[in-house]
Image (cartoon, rainbow, N blue to C red):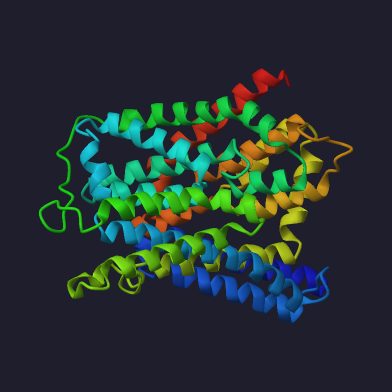
Amino acid sequence: MDALELHTKWMILVFIIGYVCITIEHLIHVNKATTALLMGIICWVIQFLYGSTECGGALPCLQEHIAEISQIVFFLIGALAIVELISAHNGFAIIANAIDFRSKRSLLWVVGLIAFFLSAILDNLTTTIVMVTLIGKLIDKGEDRLMLGGAVVIAANAGGAWTPIGDVTTTMLWVGGQISTLNVMRHLFFPSVMTLVASFAVLSLMLKGSFKPKEVHLEGNKVEPRGKLILFLGVACLVFVPIFKVLTGLPPFMGVLFGVGVLWLITDILHRNHGDRDHLRIPSVMTKVDFSSILFFLGILLAIDALDTAGVLKKLALSLDALFTHPAYLATLIGLASAVVDNVPLVAATMGMYTMTQYPVDDSFWQLIAYCAGTGGSILIIGSAAGVVFMGLEKVNFIWYCKKISLAALVGYFAGIALYLLNANL
């Protein structure tokens, strides 16, 4: 056994141990962010000491991955700051008071449809942050609130899969030239809708009856000064992110930070003459951002990128290709694998494995990859950015998600594939 094989196995072992510790967080009482950070750093230490790379050394590889990870982290910080600013102004009370949610099933479908279409405009990560925060304003902590949060993860991932800007993997294929805007939307919209409908049909069986709405209030259910304006501007800033990217060519995190800057300026001007409104300004709001969730996300990405640098994920993809020669089977399996590991390196490896000559632009293979990688992550809570954010915001443990949400996500996943294959006549 050579050194490369040995160090790779050690990295895989560290990842598995960390993965298990994250899943049993509620039993060992060790914060998942702690585990994720240690797992990511240890994997990179092993890679630095014993690994070989194809990018000129471990340090250049790490710097390359950090450049990508930092974009996601900054995006997450900016999106959370905007959502927290709206929450500080009690802006979500406006939406909460406009929704009749006495029926649990009715609220499930309303929340799901909003998340589905919002994700297509924004992205699944931002949508999950917004919707989970909104649900927290609607419902007291408990099983029903977690069920709706899990439903948001499914809806956001399904909604993000059918547009080029809705999910990072679809964006990768779009930027790489494998898919085009109108065709991917036309071919993946109905399979994505099928995913939502099938999954929510299963979840509806678990939600029965009605409940009393939680009163949304800081001071007698009153919206803070300028709350309506901040709600409008906050949502507008999030919606503007993809437009900003198209207009400037800058990455999405720049658009989000631009929105934070604009809101910071506006709130400073609005509240500068009111000493009792310091809690409505960005410096105070930033103290409420859940940075443990951000660090958890950072640790997970570091670990995955270390495995990618070591060539583990590419070898996995190549092994799958040898076992499953039919493109539909391979895409389906990649989607299932994305529930366990990050879908970004899996899609990146797939793009490297197959040429545009073999599968030209808008080939059904690339469209199915976009769908499967986007929706397959819903099956496990750590399989998508939306799930990871939900896990952090609501402190959901891995086992609960498997018991309550995974089956519904799996049913929706295969229902969408079946509809796509039926339409494509594969």
Q: Position of residue 174 (x, y in %)?
A: 70, 43
Q: Position of residue 262 (x, y in %)?
A: 44, 63
Residue at the location (33% across, 51% down)? 231
Q: Residue furthest right?
A: 357
Out of 348 and 129, give the one closest to the viewer: 129
Give the quadrant of residue 108: top left
> In the picture shown, does residue 386 fall above or below 257?
above
- Using the rendered image of the protein, determine whether residue 426 is visible from the camera's viewpoint: yes
> In the picture shown, does residue 236 fall above or below 198?
below
Quadrant of the rendering where the C terminus is positioned = top right
Q: Residue furthest left?
A: 220
Q: Position of residue 352 (x, y in %)?
A: 81, 50
Quadrant of the rendering where the N terminus is positioned = bottom right
Out of 121 and 319, give the one closest to the viewer: 121
Q: Position of residue 317 (x, y in %)?
A: 75, 49
Residue at the location (40% across, 26% down)? 201
